[in-house]
Image (cartoon, rainbow, N blue to C red):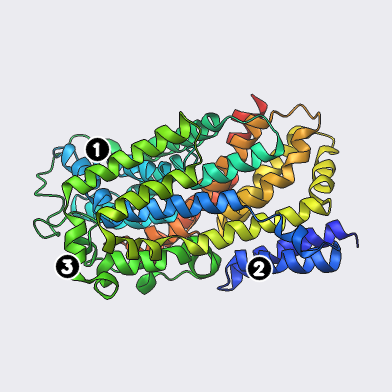
Amino acid sequence: MSPELISIYALAVMFIIATLLPINMGILAFVGAFLIGTLVAGLGTKEIIAGFPTGLFLTLVGITYLFALAQNNGTIDWLVQLAVRAVKGHVAAIPWIMFFIAAVLTSVGAVSPAAVAIIAPIALGFAIQHKISPLLMGLMVIHGAQAGGFSPISIYGGITNGIVAKAGLPLSAVTTFAASFFVNFAVAALLFVLLGGRKLMSRRAVMAGVSDSIPDGVPAGSVGAMSNIRTIGQSTPQGGAQVYGDAEAESLREELELSMGNADSVMGKQVARESAFSKPYQMVTIAGLVLLAVLTLAFKLDIGFVAITIGLVLSLMSPNLQKRAIGQVSWPEIVLITGVSTYVGVLEAMGTIDFVGHSVAGMTSPLIAALLLCFIGAVVSAFASSTAVLGSLIPLAVPFLQADTGVGAIGFIAAMAVSSTIVDVSPFSTNGALVLANAQGVDRDQFFRRLMGYGALVTVVAPVVVWGLFVVL
């Protein structure tokens, strides 16, 4: 067996193990990079470590650190509260408010499951209170989170754009972002119509505060509000990588424990009160997020350094808050992404990337090859980590895109990005599991079957649709 095939089979084994067992795929990838690089490719330690993505590591640390500060100081809760109050009793607007809030969170750097973990309990609480379909509300939150997932300063966007730029392919970060946003927006609009949204348009509701079930003076999503909602760890029936071993889920563990009532063990009640209700501090935080976008997009400064700098300023304003934020940095997510990237570096060094790319490019129809890659991304991502899929499959497609196949790189990257993330509605993914766990007033088994059926439909249909829109047309 050739070294290239051995390295590909090893990658497949990693996906299987991470899906079946509670093991972070990043750890598997680091070990795989060491074993395959040393025993199969004959690489030295320095050559293996050379594949570690230092720039991406800094970006992930900076973004997740800054977002943790924004959540801890009450900025996210405050924005949710303002947005819900802005609907002024228009029940039909509530699902869309949740869609756009989730999109904003991921577009400014939140990990998609973290955004869903914050918004889903609030959204599903509104669903039961105002008799909105829980399935509609849950799917609106997930598609909202995915809609903002490929902004130039987001996690998904940073991974994808970095890989494309490194390969020297034509790069259009705005195109990938727009593709993800409008596809998810269109799907959300269709779901709104099919799942009873039109009936909501004639209804009004008197909204006392944010929710009748939340005590006065406590922002939605804050420690006080969220403590009344069960956590994912207590109620999720799913298993596998997306719930346990996958870093996207692992990174939520401390996040959920801290935001749903256990913050006292980390920083004390006084610090929680100090940080959660300071409007000037929240305004500075919003200004910091805006400044992050301006400095990185307009002035091309490194997003990791800028995010850490803004985070430091916020920490100096409230030093005790910094301790909690450091603990909420998505370290398991970072291990996953950097581990997979390091393994991909080994694949590149030993020629596997070129081997796969030329094999795909050698297919009779380049368009069919592109469709096949989109399907692989969708199917694997429905059960495994979307970030891992993006980090591994896009590099494998680079030689195919560099060859003269007639398939445009910009359109293909957009199609691959959407097909690999829109399937996170599956109940076997972190996002789907969060919605399932927080759904109220439903038959749990029936809700699971409906969510699984919808996830299967999306996995089959989405790759074909995005392939037709962005590759064929």
Viewer-nearest residue: 220 or 96? 220
Identify whether 228 is placed above or below 357. below
Give the residue type at disc 2: Leu
Few, some or many C-alpha atoms within 10 Å of disc 1 (few <14, some 14-19, many ≥20)? some
Few, some or many C-alpha atoms within 10 Å of disc 2 (few <14, some 14-19, many ≥20)? many
Viewer-nearest residue: 380 or 60? 60
Identify whether 351 is placed above or below 257. above
Q: Position of residue 291 (x, y in %)?
A: 36, 36
Disc 1, SS:
helix
Q: Which mark is residue 93?
A: 1
Report the residue marked by disc 3.
270
Viewer-nearest residue: 178 or 426? 178
From the image, which quarter does the C terminus lie in?
Answer: top right
Instruction: For marks 1 and 3, give the CA distance.
Output: 36 Å
* Left or right position of 463 against 225: right
Select label 2 or label 3 by which is in front: 3
In which quarter of the view is residue 221 placed? bottom left
